């Protein structure tokens, strides 16, 4: 069975600084997808960034980028130029490439942004 | 921008009562998911529908939980009887399926259930 682990329950960053959230996963599959979702307080979960396992190039979305290390089964999220609106719970998630659609989530990391 | 709708947003009930949650996915999304998120944890899949058919309900406690999507559009998740341990956020998500590939899941705002 696949598992996703986020070892940082809480992180904080100064506004305009850079922060990295860690995620490791375990799978025996070669075809899969990895995601970072953001869940602001009392608001719905939204997709931040997505990475296909077959792609060697790390995904980027504006201030958000990932460091995907397939051999190490590591998938970290880097947030550059942090903004107050980035404060939220961040979840790392895994999806099998077998098209089941099911997302397997980590425990989440609460990010605090200090002004 | 199209969104996944859920109601109610909050529900307080007493133990042993019945509760029901409703979800309306983004128009055209054939795949619908119900997740349960216990406070401080990541969501866990309860049930997945492809159109009106259940494709995964392996984590659904079938003795008390039921889910349906009769016309392949909106969906209802029911708990009867509710137990204290059912207190959680219930999230609905939907996605397109393009050439047998599930696309990105979009989540609704969730229903927060408190069982007293």
Image (cartoon, rainbow, N blue to C red):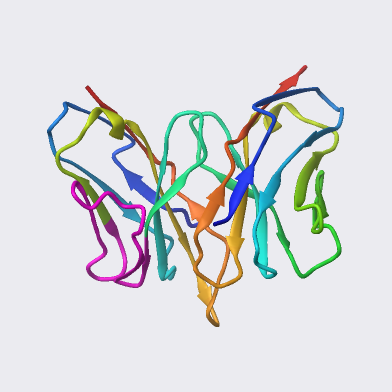
Q: Is residue B55 magenta?
A: yes
Nearer to the camera, B87 or B7: B87
Q: Is residue A88 above or below residue A65?
A: above
Q: Residue furthest bottom?
A: B99
Where is residue B111 drawn, in percent x and y? 35, 38
Residue at screen point 21% across, 48% down:
B78
Where is residue A8 drawn, in percent x and y? 69, 29
Whether residue A71 sits left or right of residue A2 in the image: it is right
Q: Residue furthest top?
A: A115
Residue at screen point 28% across, 58% down:
B75
Q: How many marks?
A: 0
Nearer to the camera, B72 or A105: A105
Where is residue A78 drawn, in percent x and y? 81, 41
Whether residue A73 sits left or right of residue B40 in the image: it is right
Q: Which quadrant holds the N terminus of chain A?
A: bottom right
Nearer to the camera, A3 or B73: A3
Q: Is residue B85 above or below residue B108?
A: above
Q: Is residue B65 above or below residue B98?
A: above
Q: Is residue B107 above or below residue A8?
A: below
Residue at screen point 30% across, 31% down:
B85
* Residue B114 picture quarter: top left
Q: Is residue B39 at all visible to an observer of this figure?
A: yes
Q: Is residue B72 magenta?
A: yes
Q: Which residues are magenta?
A: B48-75
Where is residue A33 drawn, in percent x and y? 66, 62
Q: Is residue B1 at all visible to an observer of this figure?
A: no
Residue at screen point 35% across, 58% down:
B58
* Residue B80 picture quarter: top left
Q: Which quadrant holds the C terminus of chain A?
A: top right
């Amino acid at each position: 069975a696949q598992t996703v682990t986020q070892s940082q329950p809480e992180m904080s960053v100064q506004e305009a600084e850079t922060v990295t959230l860690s995620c490791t996963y375990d799978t025996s599959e070669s075809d899969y997808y990895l995601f970072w979702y953001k869940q602001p307080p009392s608001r719905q979960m939204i997709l931040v960034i997505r990475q296909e396992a077959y792609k060697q190039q790390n995904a980027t979305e504006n201030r958000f980028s990932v460091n995907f290390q397939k051999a190490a089964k590591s998938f970290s999220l880097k947030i550059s130029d942090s903004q107050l609106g980035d404060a939220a719970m961040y979840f790392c998630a895994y999806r099998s490439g077998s098209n089941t659609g099911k997302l397997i989530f980590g425990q989440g990391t609460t990010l605090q942004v200090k002004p | 921008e199209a969104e996944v709708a859920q109601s109610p947003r909050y529900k307080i009930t007493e133990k042993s009562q019945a509760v029901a949650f409703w979800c309306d996915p983004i128009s055209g999304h054939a795949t619908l998911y119900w997740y349960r998120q216990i406070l401080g944890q990541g969501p866990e899949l309860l049930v997945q529908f492809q159109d009106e058919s259940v494709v995964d309900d392996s984590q659904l406690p079938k003795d008390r939980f039921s889910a349906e999507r009769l016309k392949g559009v909106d969906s209802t998740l029911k708990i009867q009887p509710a137990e204290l341990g059912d207190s959680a956020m219930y999230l609905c998500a939907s996605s397109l399926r393009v050439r047998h590939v599930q696309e990105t899941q979009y989540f609704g705002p969730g229903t927060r259930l408190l069982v007293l």
